[in-house]
Image: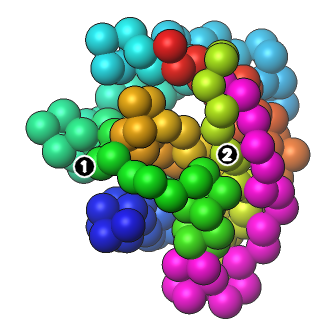
Amino acid sequence: MRYITQYLGIFLVVLGLTACDQKKEDPKQDQQSAAQRQQQNISLLDGKLTFSLPQDMSDQTGKLGTESNNMHVYANGNGQQAVIVIIGDETQLSLSQLSQKLQDQQRNRDPQLQVVADKSIMLGHTQGQQLDSVVSTNNHSNWSTVVLAKLNNQLITLQISLPADNQSQSQSIASEIVQSIVIH
């Protein structure tokens, strides 16, 4: 659990950087539907974890994380959209227990946390847990989707952070990413 807390701290740094950058994305991009966006395929853990990201997100692992500490970071050009993948340690806790602990930690940092959904999902043939929420930092709100899963009892956490200015668009982008996740 201490590793989840450590990585959540890193996520909050990324979230803080996002909140500091108040640049708006091109309005033409806002009108583009998520289905029209080109996707890029990502493969980690020798192909055991695969998912797709919007084409405008690039690997920022060298800037905010390293493969040696099992954290991968993807972000768009202005840093407002980010996906963080953490390959954690083994855990005996259930995914719903981990999700509840995550909610409690987030609520301690953000009393205005709005939990939208906490549900069980399938990632290919693997059970997962999805936590959707709106997180506020420095008077700026972000849509947050956290997906928790286990691979050989090893915790895999995928954190998606998007601006909440257009919540339906952020939900759509996050949903598209989540639907593409497969654990083999």
- In the rendered image, the residue lying farthest to the front is 92
Q: Position of residue 45 (x, y in %)?
A: 32, 20
Q: Is residue 57 above or below residue 149?
A: above
Name the residue tied to disc 2. Answer: 129
10 Å neighbourhood of mark 2: few (<14), some, or many (≥20)?
Answer: many
The image quadrant that residue 99 belongs to is bottom right
Name the residue tied to disc 1. Answer: 64
> Sequence-wise, which precedes: disc 1 or disc 2?
1
In this image, 10 relative to 23: left or right?
left
Residues shaded magenta:
104-123
Q: Which residue does the image show at 87% across and 46% down from the upper left?
A: 168
The disc placed on residue 82 is none
Front residue of 117/128: it is 128
The reply to whether the C-beta atoms of the residues labelled 1 and 2 are less than 8 Å apart is no
Spatial CA distance of label 1 from label 2 is 25 Å
Q: Which residue does the image show at 50% across and 58% down from the upper left?
A: 93
Secondary-structure class at tag 1: helix
**Residue 154 on the magenta segment:** no
10 Å neighbourhood of mark 1: few (<14), some, or many (≥20)?
Answer: some
Q: Position of residue 41 (x, y in %)?
A: 50, 11
Specify the color scheme: rainbow
Which amino acid type corresponds to the residue marked 1 in the rendered image?
Leu
Q: Which residue does the image show at 82% across and 57% down from the upper left?
A: 117
Front residue of 157/81: it is 157
Q: Is residue 111 above or below residue 143?
A: below
Which amino acid type corresponds to the residue marked 2 in the rendered image?
Gln
Q: Position of residue 88 (x, y in %)?
A: 33, 46
Q: Position of residue 59 (x, y in %)?
A: 33, 28
The answer to whether residue 29 is visible is no
For the N terminus, the quadrant is bottom left
